[in-house]
Image (cartoon, helix red, strand yellow):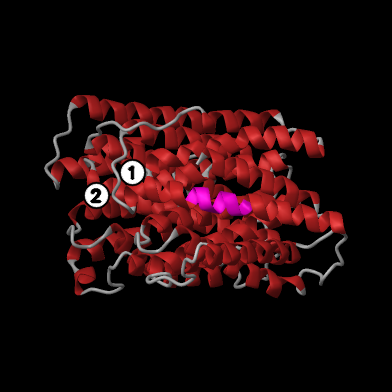
Amino acid sequence: MSLSMAAFTINDTLTKSVMDTLNTGQIMFVRGAVILAGLLVYLRVLRRPILAKGMFSAPVIVRTGGELAMTVLFLGALAHLPLANATAVLQAVPLAVALGAALYLGERVGWRRWTAILIGFCGVLLIVRPGLAGFNAYTLMVVGAVIFAAVRDLATRRIVATVPSLTISALTALTVTLTGLVLIVPLGGWTPMDASVVVILMAAAGFLFAGYLFIVMAMREGDIGFVAPFRYTALLWALILGLAFFGEFPDTATLAGAAIMSAPLPLPAPVTRNLTAIATMTLAMALFALDDSFIKLAAAEINVGQVILLQTLIAVVVFAILTRLSGDALWSRAFLARPVVLRNTGEVLGVVCFVTALALMPLSTASAILQAQPLVVTLGAALFLGEKVGWRRWTAVMIGFFGVLIIIRPGMAGFTPAALLAVGAVIGLAVRDLATRRVETGISTMQLSTFASVVILPPAFVMMMAYGGWSPMSFQTTLYVIGAAMSGMGAYYAITLSLRIGELSTAVRVDPGLFPVR
């Protein structure tokens, strides 16, 4: 993995050096063609077959698609970001991979790894800084690249051993090359290249090929949750090469975020269900915070109903694909069971009531009322689910509630009728959380997330029309919506999983309730 990161970073440096001359499509095509030709010659010399049984299986196709999307997004961002900054954001891949390995592949992840993921994610937020002066919209393209790189690595783990690594690399190179060819004209057309540019691209292709080969070997042979953190070695290479070739050096916040991400290397350790639930809930809350930031940025141009509708549509498509890849059905009569119906009803009530309350009352007042949710859930867990809630948990929830009130300092003008909507949101979200615990284990968390997203679509459409209807979006706002969708999906899956595996009265204490869309 360390060798792979060194090769990839050198390739990024060489590629960035020609971006002032060539467009992204031409770079992808030329570089990919060199890699593909070298692979075919290599396979021919070794007398190894180019085709292999299983090379067009679902894991290989998903891996190739993830690699393609990651390449397009990262190269598009690299032209507008310093090398070290782009590489620093890309170090979130181990966080996403380790999380996916635990939730999707069933690998054992102890509290140390969960802690590393959470700390590392805080580092990502420090680098990206959504909504702040240091924010660059192209950083969101790197965040998208992170997501697709994680998809690539997780899918690699599912590829059968009969498919050689070289065959996988050849198929990936072919796909990237053909996509680059298609993108040349839309991105500005072909630009003549002199000998120096050709040599640089050939060298970049060589390092990229080495990176492909090493990362496939690492992800197939090692514990994916343990191997992934060694991607952080790319940061050192990016700092050195960015300073040497481009005179670039990241600002203090980026360095601090990179240090936070690189510091905690996750190690295997035993873990209890409650600790896992707490870690997953904390991750969900961090993702909801990021989702909230993207929604606020997008809402500067389009109404909040349109943002929610679009991010929910994206969630439905992505969750549905992941559900099918998991081997689960998109529909089952079990979805009509009382706990599922009750859960989705609470979800719709909570989202609609809270977003409507935000339009009619100050954010601090609505948020303060929502702090009653952990209290209601804890009470419900004790009364309806039979969970034992001692005085320490009650005290922790109450102290947390008063602490939030001190921080938010809601206005004291009095209780307005609109506040009843926020109270309705508290009840709806509490019903959702309590009902989640009663959903039968035969329904996977991915299925539950897919169905809940579908149920949100109609009220989201009504909200969009009520707030003024559809509005055209700029490219930057589109990126904000995509960012909201990705972070919202991760948050929703994490909170659903947390509520199913741990004691509710334990998990909800992590939930600060400060996020407008759940």
Start-end of magenta stretch: 208-215
Residue 329 point in image, percent of width and height: 28, 72
Tell me if residue 503 comes above or below residue 192 in the rendering: above
Residue at horizontal 46 percent and vertical 72 percent from the top: 51
Q: Is residue 259 left or right of residue 13?
A: left
Q: Secondary structure at mark 1?
A: helix
- Which of labels 2 and 1 is toward the front? 2
Q: Quadrant of residue 302?
A: bottom right
Judge left or right: residue 413 versus residue 284: right
Relative to 21, residue 460 above or below:
below
**In the image: residue 82, left or right of residue 399:** right
Residue located beneath label 2 in the image: 500
Q: Nearer the viewer, residue 500 or 395?
A: 500
Residue 212 part of the magenta-drawn span: yes
Q: What residue is disc 1 on?
A: 373
Of the numbered discs 2 and 1, the one sitting upstream in the chain is: 1
Residue 209: mark in rendering: none
Residue 278 colored in magenta in the image: no
Q: Residue 128: which quarter of the image?
A: top right
The answer to whether residue 284 is seen in the rendering is: no
